[in-house]
Amino acid sequence: MDGLPAIFYQKYWEVVGTSVTMACLSCLNGGESLEPVNRTLITLIPKTQKAECMADYRPISLCNVTYKIVAKTLANKLRGVMCEVISDNQSAFIPGRLISDSTIIGFECLHALKRRKRKNGSMALKLDMSKAYDHMEWSFFISMMEKMGFSDRWVNRIRDCISSVSFAFNLNGDVCGSVKPSRGLRQGDPLSPYLFPICAEGLSCILRQAVINNRMAGFQCIRAGPNISHLFFADDCLLFSKASEKDCRTIKYVLDAYAKVSGQIINFKKSSLCVSKSIMDLKGRNLADIVGVRLVDCHAHYLGLPCFTGRKKKHLFEGIKDRIWNKIKGWNAKIFSSGGKEVLVRVFLQAIPTYGMSLFRLPKSIIRDLHRMFARFRCGGAEEARKIHWGSWEKLCESKNLGGLGFRNLDIFSRALLSKQGWRLISTPNSLVARVLKNRYYPAASFLKAEKCSSRSMVWNSILWGWGILEAGTRCWIGNGSTVYIKNDRWIPQPATFQIVSPRVFGNLTTLNTLFLPSGGWNVPLIKAFFLSRMTWKKS
């Protein structure tokens, strides 16, 4: 621990660059110990506004910059193979997977679970991991990496990174103490976000094996859909299974076994269980007692968003307004210029609801209230007195070239975000979230041909709202032509409809492959016989 921040190395790289590079390469390739550069300063960050005890603080590790360079190099290498060693049930820090994947699957499963009317019913268990990073046993994830097939040299490099650490503490600006840990991952270490999913994969493997051995059932949104027994996003865990004593005892046994070997501590007092509506309250309480958790009617939130939505959607999203208003009240608007307020609105305030808008279509009343809050802050601040607004919000949302300020119209922006979710379903059809939604809502068609159904969730309703943007600008990729229908699909490279406008009857010609010659080219005489002569054809 040299007390030098990263900006020092950036500014004086011409002086220290060669020495730092040689030191890092000697650790990565030469087998030099990391202990001299692995002394870490612990700083406590309050988790609440009124932190009164140690449990209210989160320890953050301030690592040496030289160590961070070494660890970041290893993390970048590890990142490239995470998709191969981590199952689809995890999405945190995995390239190509997003937090929205876990959120959508979780909401769909919870929506289907609460609507399920089968006699046996299903259950969803939400777990609370107590200080998940701090309690992880080093021997456990070293064993996990060896089982996954990582080479001995690689495992030894990772072992050296985590075991050579020592801690000092930042107390009121003074550095004091020295502690040598025997377990735990540091928050602030570039390797930690990739090592934790490897550890969690141990629990994932046990749960999948329990389903294979019929010791627990898992959950299917629809009979032909994927079996979802669990969803992990970092230390957020959501488990699904049949609402039976057998499954509860299996889950309890698996969790206790995992906690014993990994060092993880599950806070059962903060964990909760919800069951299908067909399950009687007495049976639900009995199942919750077996696991050792409390029974709830429904899980209020999952990954920061409300799990269940009913008719009172506005009430569920009031939290977004509260977060924005609390930020505005915390700023002294008088010290900001008009340009400063413009930057705060565009860059900071309008970013707060982005996560929620990427999954849900917010009620129009919420959108209007947010627009009023943005406009009010720009014109005045958090004062109760009304200020004069010198332009409508719609005008301010126009680009600067057209006389506006380039603010986002949240309704339009939300639809664009939801259309991106639809595009991910098209571009990654083998992902777990795409398979879950396809089996439930469009099993025999493509996403662009999905239709509304009576049992759809709010997430699916929202994605369908964004579907219109995709539908207006997409065309079918012809390929071998076996899945593209001549009359109904959009496949012709001519706007604006991209569809056949010929009034002639096509007879038995249904799909495009009926217009191909055996050699793969177009059957020109057949085309001229059935289509208007002014249309031209080009096979992609």
Image (cartoon, rainbow, N blue to C red):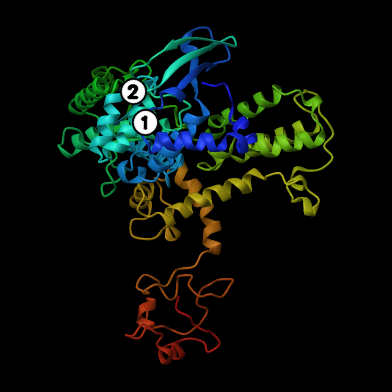
344, above or below 423, in the image: above
Q: Are marks 2 and 1 in contact (CB under 8 Å)?
A: yes
Q: Position of residue 452 (x, y in %)?
A: 44, 53
For residue 345, above or below residue 462? above
Q: Residues within 10 Å of mark 1 (few under 14, many from 20)?
A: some
From the viewer's side, name the closer residue of 286 and 281: 286
> Residue 196 got which mark?
1
- In this view, the residue in front, 310 or 373, is 373
Q: Residues within 10 Å of mark 2 (few under 14, many from 20)?
A: many
Q: Residue 531 — which label? A: none
114 with respect to 351 (left or right): left
Q: Is residue 204 left or right of residue 509?
A: left
The front one of 188 and 67 is 67
Residue at 78 percent across and 23 percent down: it is 383
Answer yes or no: is residue 428 visible. yes
Amino acid residing under circle 2: Met
Instruction: Indicate the secondary structure of the residue bearing disc 2.
Output: loop
Q: Residue at x 36, y 42 (%)?
A: 82
The residue where tag 2 is placed is 136
Q: Earlier in the sequence, mark 2 or mark 1?
A: 2
Which residue appears at 20% of the width and 33% of the height?
216
Q: Residue at x 71, y 36 (%)?
A: 345
Under circle 1, the secondary element is helix
Instruction: Residue 80: give x, y in percent of width and height.
Output: 39, 46
Rendered location of residue 167, percent (x, y): 45, 16
- Foreground of the two, 355 or 65: 65
Picture coordinates of residue 372, whole percent (x, y): 72, 35
Three-letter code for the amino acid on which mark 1 is drawn? Phe
Give the Cα distance between marks 2 and 1.
8 Å
